[in-house]
Amino acid sequence: MFYDGPTGLLRLVVIGPLAYAWLVLVLRLTGKRTLAQLNAFDFIVTVALGSTLATVVLTDSVALSEGALALAVLAVLQLVVAWLSVRVGWLRRAITSEPTLLLRDGEPLPEAMAAQRIALPALHQCVRSAGFGDLAQVGAVVLETNGTISVIGAGSVGRGSVLPET
């Protein structure tokens, strides 16, 4: 249907800004870490917050108070899990993966690439996107815990103290 009447539009105009303001407040109270996408779990929470906000704004069967509570619960759960993962090793290992070294000193690591389902053309694309035209110019390529790929130039690797072990 194209138009259901003014009631739905009025609800959007009222509930939208209120839900948005509430989410901003919740995020400010729970801190920057709530939206930091350092691993897959963080990404899921970010998507869930956005989905919940959209549901509150667009679905008239969800009251603002229910949506506000849902947003707060998600943010607090993220806060608690992040806090615990810093302090409890087994929990950190359960919810986050380790970064994976895909290339070292210009040489792709085929076993690591296969384990992470990264094909050589995809690795080449990442290297090109980072501004390198030759694998020999690259000291390391790392698949990070959040799914991003870091490309480190050969002259920037240093001792490699921040690189994952192979």
Image (cartoon, rainbow, N blue to C red):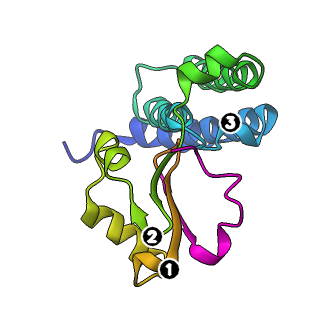
Quick check: marks 1 and 2 in contact, CB under 8 Å?
yes
Which residue occupies 58% across, 39% down? 14
Secondary element under disc 3, as helix, strand or loop, is helix
Inspect the image, locate mark 1, and give the three-letter code of the amino acid beneath it. Answer: Gln
Q: Which residues are magenta?
A: 148-166
| In the foreground, 17 or 34 | 34
Q: Report the residue marked by disc 1.
A: 137
In the rendered structure, the answer to whether residue 77 lies left or right of residue 52 reads right
Task: Count residues near mark 1 (Cα–Cα under 10 Å), then give few for <14, some for 14-19, many for 20+.
Answer: some
Q: Position of residue 97 (x, y in %)?
A: 51, 32
Mark positioned earlier in the residue sequence (3 or 2): 3
- Of all residues, the one furthest to the left in this rendering is 1
Which residue occupies 58% across, 46% down? 164
Mark 1 vs mark 3, CA separation in Å? 36 Å
Task: Count residues near mark 2 (Cα–Cα under 10 Å), then give few for <14, some for 14-19, many for 20+.
Answer: some
Q: Is residue 117 magenta?
A: no
Q: Is residue 153 magenta?
A: yes
Q: Report the residue marked by disc 3.
A: 34
Of badges 3 and 2, nearer the viewer stands 2
Q: Quadrant of residue 39?
A: top right
Mark 1 vs mark 2, CA separation in Å? 7 Å
| In the foreground, 43 or 139 | 139
Which residue occupies 55% across, 23% down? 95
In the rendered structure, the answer to whether residue 157 lies left or right of residue 84 reads left
Q: Position of residue 59 (x, y in %)?
A: 40, 28
Tag shown at residue 106: 2
Inspect the image, locate mark 2, and give the three-letter code of the amino acid beneath it. Answer: Gly
| In the foreground, 60 or 41 | 41
Mark 3 vs mark 2, CA separation in Å? 36 Å
Which residue occupies 66% across, 27% down? 75
Secondary element under disc 1, as helix, strand or loop, is helix
